[in-house]
Amino acid sequence: MNAKPPATILTRRALVGSLSLAAGGLLTGCDALTANQGWRDTLRLAETGNMALQRGLLGQDGLAREYSPRDISRSVPANGTRAPSDADYLRQAATGFSDWTLSIDGLVERPTRFALGQIRSMPRQTQITRHDCVEGWSAIGKWTGVNLAALLDAVKLRDSARYLVFHCADSLRAGPYYESIDLVDARHAQTMIAWALNDELLPIGNGAPLRLRVERQLGYKHAKYIRRIEAVADYRLSYGGGGGYWEDAAGYEWYAGI
Ligand SMILES: Nc1nc2c(c(=O)[nH]1)N[C@H]1C(S)=C(S)[C@@H](COP(=O)(O)O)O[C@H]1N2
Ligand SMILES: [Mo]
């Protein structure tokens, strides 16, 4: 990784990383760092360790840093899909997303299809936070949207629900984009379905009309162009099983805590 996050994040990730690397070393020995199944399993173990350590260090409810308006970056780059070319999306974009709906279904008591206007008229929250992409850039933006926990309360999750899978309207080379998070991140105070950036409706490049902000996770977890949120018992049963597009396509960690 060549990202250069500020010192607080570096410290946290370096600490978490060195502790879990130490654990990995104990398990495999230093010369066993090969791309075999054993090492992959060790990586998975280390990832689980990262999650436990990070949640332990930060607490489940710890907030990502919020910035002041003068810190806002001149622009938040559009990354990954910048303009979905999928026919349905293009049709929706042509009418200003007037027919866009967000479905929340799966393991919920009241599967619901929310109209975009409904989402935008729900109580909103705003936060100025930094987006960190694994490709090595960050940008600070002011995000406005609806708290995800409030949406989940409206549809009432069943007890069997453990994860949320976000289905997106765009496809990349390997297939449709998707992501998943657990309920700790889903119910975190700063987690929202955002519909505005820097006091304007979300531009297409940044995920119009709806995108996820999950502030304690790396950029690829922040699903753009969301049209469906599915509550599931196990994200490993969806798509390629990795829990996200990049997790499946490139082996990125499912838990990408920062
Ligand atoms: N649907 C969808 N969501 C996505 C992506 C994408 O290609 N498609 N790219 C991800 C990556 S890698 C990053 S860094 C952020 C980029 O968000 P931005 O375009 O607003 O900077 O979106 C994430 N969410
Ligand atoms: Mo990214």
Image: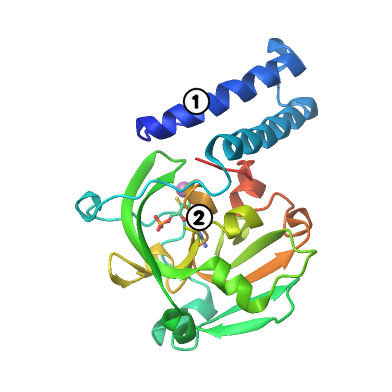
Which residue position holds label 1? 14
Task: Locate residue 200, reporting x and y percent.
Answer: 29, 72
Q: Quadrant of residue 240?
A: bottom right
User: Please, what secondary structure does the residue beneath circle 1 have?
Assistant: helix
Residue at left offset 69%, top offset 75%: 105
Asked whether residue 182 is in view, the answer is no
Query: CA–CA distance between discs 1 and 2?
Result: 21 Å
Q: For label 1, count other residues whose C-alpha is less than 10 Å away and answer few (under 14), some (14-19) or many (20+).
A: few
Task: Locate residue 11, reporting x and y percent.
Answer: 44, 27
Q: For label 2, count other residues whose C-alpha is less than 10 Å away and answer few (under 14), some (14-19) or many (20+).
A: many
Residue at left offset 32%, top offset 56%: 141
Q: Quadrant of residue 28?
A: top right
Q: Please tell me the numbered disc located at residue 214.
A: 2
Residue 132 vs residue 63, the one in the foreground: 63
Question: What's the amino acid at mark 2?
Answer: Val
Asked whether residue 171 is in view, the answer is yes
Residue 191 vs residue 176, the one in the foreground: 191
Residue at left offset 63%, top offset 38%: 51
**Position of residue 88 in the picture relative to residue 197 (left or right):** right
Task: Locate residue 187, reporting x and y percent.
Answer: 58, 60
N-term mark: 1 or 2 = 1
Residue 7 vs residue 247, the one in the foreground: 7
> In the figure, 31 relative to 69: above or below?
above
Task: Locate residue 112, reporting x and y percent.
Answer: 64, 83
Question: What's the amino acid at mark 1?
Answer: Ala
**Color theme of the render:** rainbow
**Position of residue 72 in the picture relative to residue 225 (left or right):** left
**Position of residue 2 in the picture relative to residue 32 (left or right):** left
